[in-house]
Image (tube, grey):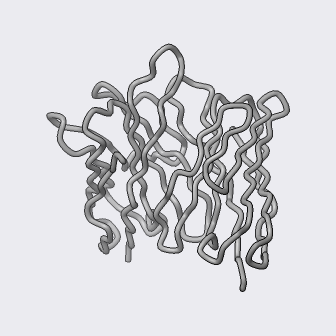
Amino acid sequence: GQQVQQSPASLVLQEGENAELQCNFSSTATRLQWFYQRPGGSLVSLLSNPSGTKHTGRLTSTTVTKERRGSLHISSSQITDSGTYLCAMGSNTGYQNFYFGKGTSLTVIP
Amino acid sequence: GPKVLQIPSHQIIDMGQMVTLNCDPVSNHLYFYWYKQILGQQMEFLVNFYNGKVMEKSKLFKDQFSVERPDGSYFTLKIQPTALEDSAVYFCASSLALRGGRPYEQYFGPGTRLTVL
């Protein structure tokens, strides 16, 4: 079945440092979407990026579809960025179910 | 932005009972999804639903599970009977219909935490 691998599993940064989160997927995805999962569990959609590079605020998503990989760059990390970042691959069927990675747990310390 | 609501936020039931989880999708959306996340594990696709029918389901979508959206109201996930391994957070999502092969973004609800005792 579809597989999504995220790395690293966890990351600790000092405030102000940059973070680079990686995502690899097992088959051609029509879309890659990054989510932030709050400690309580709710999801916040960050960026949806089928290919190329997209920016929003301090976030940059880069997806290289042919190489089945994507990344999320967080610049100038803040303590409030702490949480779990999920990479989700849209399936290549018509219904675009998401297949999720296990997430990267980010902790930003002062 | 568009919001998906889920009711209730928490549900505790005894094993063997029936439970219905309710999702209020974004009003003009036509595709609906359920995902399951066991505590500490990754989120996994259960089922999608369009035009009154299940279009795809995963192996996690057991025979005890069913979905429906009667009369365009809530999109529901029913589990009957429940088992201990059904304890998880269930997320509902919705999206606009596909157009020209390009999918629209899925919007996720906040989840319903189900505890089966």
Residue at 31%, 67% (x, y): give it: B9
* Residue B7 higher or lower than B104, as above or below: below
Residue at 61%, 53% (x, y): give it: A57
Q: Give the percent coordinates (x, y) of residue A53.
A: 72, 37
Q: Give the percent coordinates (x, y) of residue A86.
A: 63, 56
**Across the whole image, how many numbered discs are drawn on residues?**
0
Closer to us: B92 or A80: A80
Q: Give the percent coordinates (x, y) of residue A28.
A: 73, 28
Q: Give the percent coordinates (x, y) of residue B60.
A: 52, 48
Judged left or right of residue B18, residue A5 is right
For this orientation, the residue located farthest to the right is A67
Judged left or right of residue A2, residue A21 is right
Location of the C terminus of chain B (image quadrant): bottom left
Residue at 53%, 45% (x, y): give it: B45
For this orientation, the residue located farthest to the top is B100
For this orientation, the residue located farthest to the left is B71
Closer to us: A22 or B53: A22
Judged left or right of residue A10, residue B39 is left
Judged left or right of residue B89, residue A23 is right
Residue at 26%, 53% (x, y): give it: B22
